[in-house]
Amino acid sequence: MSLYHSGIGMTSQRTRARMIDRLRVQNIEDEVVLAAMNSAPRHLFVEEALASRAYDDVALPINFGQTISSPFIVARMSELLHAGPTLGKVLEIGTGCGYQTTILAQLACEVYSIERIGPLLSRTRSRLREFRLNNVRLKHADGLQGLPEVGPFDGIIMTAATTHVPSALLAQLAIGGRMVYPKGSQKQYLCVIERNLQGYIEAILDEVRFVPILPGIVKN
Ligand code: SAH
């Protein structure tokens, strides 16, 4: 799929291929996720000064005290979400630089992503416009309310940590849908919540490190 401008350069294509090899060693097996990450120019989602480190397996700062998750974490969360039902509508809470959003755009029919920091979202908006992701809608709001007017969602992904999931979000998960999020404050774990006809089942997985979910919005 040719979503991006050509002319990214052989160096980054080769660097991306090495990142994909490393993700395979780290047991990421979902070929759709790997293909999406192989085509997304991760170096264009960080400041130019950090571009040379964009494909290393680290989280990097993206301004406003926020971070872009490491390639492994993005792959892991995407794989967990994609292992659920067919992804029609997906909701992401915490757009940040839009890298995870861009991967989700290749796994789902429609992606809705909410970010609370206005200036961060404006930059991401212009970046994603350049990439012509026409199945992504961005919203400046407090993601903890979700998007009741759009739900239910087959998948919900939160890219900031919370100690508990608000009932508003659980209510917007479709029956059969799944939610992937980091749970906790000091110690955090990646969790998957699945909704079935009887209710919700939660699985607690790997230990992780994320910035916290914060309430309210930042305007300027
Ligand atoms: N997936 C992002 C990760 C960004 S870090 C990326 O690839 O860049 C987490 C993001 O969640 C931050 O941008 C932060 O501002 C946002 N966030 C935190 N609390 C939020 C809330 N209540 N609603 C919406 N976004 C929130």
Image (cartoon, grey):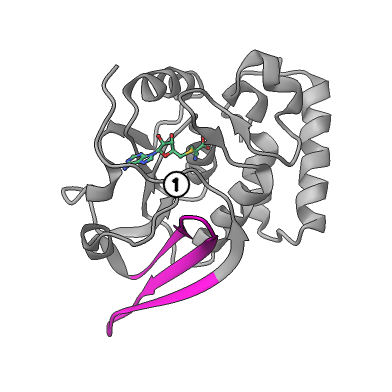
* Residue 4, above or below 48: below
On-image quarter of the C terminus: top left
Name the chief secondary structure element in magenta: strand
Horizontally, residue 132 falls left or right of residue 91, namely right
* Residue 118, above or below 160: above
Horizontally, residue 194 falls left or right of residue 147, namely right
Residue sitting at 27 percent across and 42 percent down? 215
Can you identify the residue that label 1 sits on?
A: 160
Horizontally, residue 129 falls left or right of residue 206, namely left
The magenta stretch is: 176-204
Does the beta carbon of the residue at mark 1 sit less than 8 Å from ligand 1? yes
Please provide percent x and percent y for residue 124.
Answer: 44, 24
Q: Quadrant of residue 136?
A: top left
Residue sitting at 36 percent across and 19 percent down? 119
* Residue 11, above or below 135: above
Asked if the stretch drawn in magenta spans residue 72, the answer is no
Residue 146 showing in the rendered view? no
Asked if the stretch drawn in magenta spans residue 180, the answer is yes
On-image quarter of the N terminus: top right
Residue sitting at 29 percent across and 26 percent down? 218
Along the viewing direction, whichever of 106 and 119 lies nearer the viewer? 119
Q: Amino acid at mark 1?
A: Ala
Q: Quadrant of ligand 1?
A: top left
